[in-house]
Amino acid sequence: MLKKIFVLLVILGLAFGLVLFTLNGYSFEYLWPNSPWLANVAVPLTIAVAIVVHRTVAVAIFVDIVVCCAVIVVVVVVRWSPLLLTPLSIGRQQKKRQKHHHKFFLVTSH
């Protein structure tokens, strides 16, 4: 899970680095010096790629956060549910004992 997010964050950094590389004209200078058409298309293309990668990273992190929160809720409920239910069960047992106590120890007049 963390490896996937780490890889996506590295790709996100590279995508935004490529955007900056393209906006400053270094991609035209070093990567495709003989293609002015690609230099014109590269700016919106790299921005679109960076946005797609950013959305992918955001969704992956959000899904992981939701899964972690769900696991935490389940663990807390399972761990603390006996403690939360114990006072209720003790109260019920005491009421039953009181009812039985009154049944067995009723004073009757002769």
Image: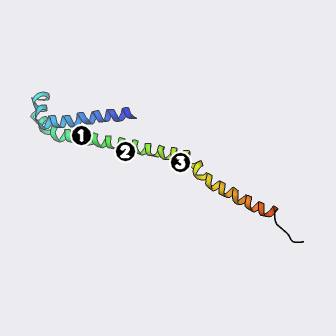
Q: Amino acid at mark 2?
A: Phe
Q: Can you say whether 102 is above or below 69 in the image?
A: below
First in sequence: mark 3 vs mark 1:
1
Q: Earlier in the sequence, mark 2 or mark 3?
A: 2
- Dot 3 lies on which element? helix
Residue 28 falls in image quadrant? top left
Q: Residues within 10 Å of mark 3 (few under 14, many from 20)?
A: few
Q: Position of residue 5 (x, y in %)?
A: 35, 36
* Residue 105 to residue 85: above or below: below
Q: CA distance from mark 2 to mark 1?
A: 18 Å
Give x and y (percent) for residue 8.
31, 35
* Numbered badge on residue 50: 1
What amino acid type is highlighted by mark number 3?
Val
Q: Return the x and y of residue 4 as percentages of the image width and height.
A: 36, 34
Q: Residue furthest right?
A: 110
Would you say the residues marked 3 and 1 are in contact, meaning their CB atoms lie under 8 Å apart?
A: no
Measure the alpha-carbon separation of dots 2 and 3. Answer: 22 Å
Residue at 38% x, 34% y is: 2
| Amino acid type for the residue under numbered disc 1 | Ala
| Residue under label 2 | 62
Residue under numbered circle 3: 77
- Answer with mark 2 or mark 1, whichever residue precedes in sequence: 1
